[in-house]
Image (cartoon, rainbow, N blue to C red):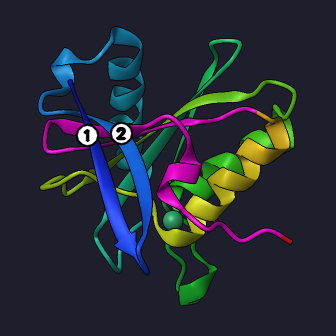
Amino acid sequence: MRVKTIIVDYMMRNLEISYEHYEDTGNMNVVDQVLISEAQAATEKANAPYSNFRVGAAVRLRSGRTFHAANFESEVFPAGLCAERSLLFFIESNYADDPIESLAIASVPSERECYPCGQCRQVIVDVERRQKSPIRVIMSGAGSATVVDSAEKLLPFTFKL
Ligand SMILES: [Zn+2]
């Protein structure tokens, strides 16, 4: 594992983001590997006839329970939903008292790591704020993974009411 840091200069200020990068997910801890496997398996359940881009997401809750979901595309195009938000909304509706510790994301095809879209990043941050604890986000693909210890690192200058 290598810890990397991105520093973005903007108007002479620095924005620093640290994350873990694993060239080979086989070098990750077993708990993370199992969650990535669950996300990969969830891609089989995707309904993606239009994009043919199947995404799977899996969460591990503080209790140790895991759940997964996949993306679902609708004939009424904007009505579909990403795997991550499908899963988070389900968890928030059914297990809100059991905080999410980790969220793994995988895709098919998997030529590169799969990163959450902007709307999903916002919702992951929303869940972190509600549960008052960070979510480890594991973005996997092509045998590698990038990990941040909080979704806030994926969404600097986050919107807040
Ligand atoms: Zn999304």
Q: Which residue is mark 2?
A: 19
Asked if residue 99 is positioned above or below residue 58 in the image, the reply reads above
Q: Secondary structure at mark 2?
A: strand
State which quarter of the image contains the N terminus: top left
Q: Which residue is mark 1?
A: 4
Which corner quadrant of the image does residue 104 belong to? Answer: top left
89 magenta-colored? no
Q: Residue furthest front?
A: 12
The tag earlier along the polypeptide, 2 or 1, is 1
Left or right: 24, with 45 as reference point: left
> Tag count in the figure?
2
Q: Quadrant of the C terminus?
A: bottom right
The answer to whether 34 appears left or right of 26 in the picture is right
Q: Choose between 103 and 75: the one closer to the eye.
A: 103
**Where in the figure is residue 59, as x and y percent of width and height?**
56, 32
Measured from the top left, where is residue 128 in percent x and y? Answer: 72, 43
Task: Please say if the residues under marks 2 and 1 sit with CB atoms less than 8 Å apart.
Answer: yes
Residue at image position (52%, 70%) is 118
Determine if residue 29 is in view.
Answer: yes
Q: Identify the mark at residue 42; answer none if there is no mark.
A: none
- 57 sits left or right of 22 in the view: right
- What amino acid does circle 2 point to? Tyr
Mark 2 to mark 1 CA distance (whole Å) = 6 Å
Residue drawn at x 30%, y 41% is: 146
The reply, left or right, for residue 154 in relation to residue 132 is left
Q: Whole-percent x and y of residue 31?
A: 41, 13
Magenta-span inclusion, residue 148: yes
Q: Tell me where the magenta segment starts and ends, as one range.
A: 133-160
Task: Classify 12 as above or below 39.
Answer: below
State the image coordinates of residue 115 (x, y, percent, origin top left).
Answer: 37, 57
Q: Vertical placement of 63 versus 93: above or below?
A: above
Does the beta carbon of the residue at mark 2 sit less than 8 Å from ligand 1?
no
